[in-house]
Image: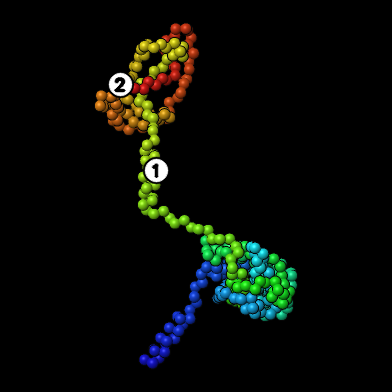
Amino acid sequence: MEQNGIKRKIDRARKSTGVVEVQGAAKAWKLALARSARDTIGLELTITNLRQTRSSLAELLEMPPERALLAMLEGPKEGLGLLVISPEILAGIVEIQMIGRVNTSAPIARRPTRTDAAMVSGMIDKALKSLELDLTQSNDLPWASGFRYASFLEDARPLALLLEDTTFQALMADVSLADGARVGQILLALPADGRGAMPKSVEPPPSRAAEMVFGAALGEQIMGAKAEIVSVLARVSLPLETILNLKIGEPLVLNDATLDKICLEGRDGLRLATGKLGQNGGMRAIRITAEGEMAPPQPVASVTKPTQPNAKPSTIPDIKKAG
């Protein structure tokens, strides 16, 4: 029983000290670093832990380890930030670009050079840009946006003069390269007063009531639109000369016209339905009897020139008479 009690206490202690999920800029920076290392130099970079703090300039100056690479960042409104890469992580970044792999042996103790800075500047800029894009709608965007690599410092002593005496947002990441071949830290420190772009506001989705009102208004507009339908009693073929000489009151013979078989067509000539001629409320009306098969439009005209002045009808354009 005593052993079971001790085991439960150990389990509770493990749960209470579990890793806390980071949010906002910290979460975005975690993803941005890994993405930029993979995309720019093909390096597998994993952040095992990340801490975000608000630090004064004095506190920030105590954070960089010895022989770390110090990259100055330039941002909006002449703001300056700092990105620090520990010697172990810097060695892995250089190795993956020089020999295509990360060594597991301890790196040689040396001071970073401008060549080292040039080899990491692309990765830094891509990570900062990715951080900015991921925070488009976040309240962290004003202080985390607009910064890019500017220069390299060979020594940490000028930092006290270059950086403003203000509060900084500091993101300290514990980093593992190539499945633990190199472990170290990357520190990002930016002014906390927020000089960058403001987050974009997100419009709330329309409510169900607003969607219903919009749908009703749209339906009213669509259903109120007019559509012209032509009722065709019959078609006749006449010589062009006869058509040109038609006079008011002159009768036309409709050989195939029937009142119980009227074709309804759209303006494009497609057959829509068939119906019967009748009355409704004292007005002429057509009662639809069956849906006609959709047919291609009839040809507009095919004129046959008559051989004689008073030639009889042969094959001339179809004339539609609507009723």
Is 295 located above or below residue 169 in the figure? above
Most distant residue in the top direction: 309
Residue 172's tag is none
Look at the numbered disc 1 and give the secondary structure of its residue: helix
Look at the numbered disc 2 and give the secondary structure of its residue: loop
Left/right of residue 217 with respect to residue 60 in the rendered view: left
Is 56 located above or below residue 241 in the figure? below
Which one is in front in this view, the residue at disc 2 or the one at disc 1? 1
User: Which residue corresponds to mark 1?
Assistant: 218
Tell which of 201 and 288 is nearer to you: 201
Q: Residue at x 46, y 23 (%)?
A: 300
Report the quarter where the C terminus lies.
Answer: top left
Residue 212's spot in the image, x, y percent?
36, 49
Asked which quadrant contains residue 130, the reply is bottom right
Which amino acid does the dot numbered 1 rest on? Leu
Residue 62's spot in the image, x, y percent?
64, 80
Q: Residue at x 64, y 78 (%)?
A: 58
Residue 287's spot in the image, x, y percent?
28, 29
Residue 39 can be seen in this image? no
Q: CA gap, disc 2 to disc 1?
A: 40 Å
Which amino acid does the dot numbered 2 rest on? Thr
Q: Residue at x 34, y 31 (%)?
A: 273
Tell which of 293 and 33 is nearer to you: 33
Residue 57's spot in the image, x, y percent?
64, 75
Colour treatment of the image: rainbow
User: Which residue corresponds to mark 2?
Assistant: 258
Report the quarter where the N terminus lies.
Answer: bottom left
Q: How busy is the neighbourhood of tag 2: few (under 14 within 10 Å), some, or many (20 plus)? A: few
Q: Residue at x 70, y 76 (%)?
A: 156
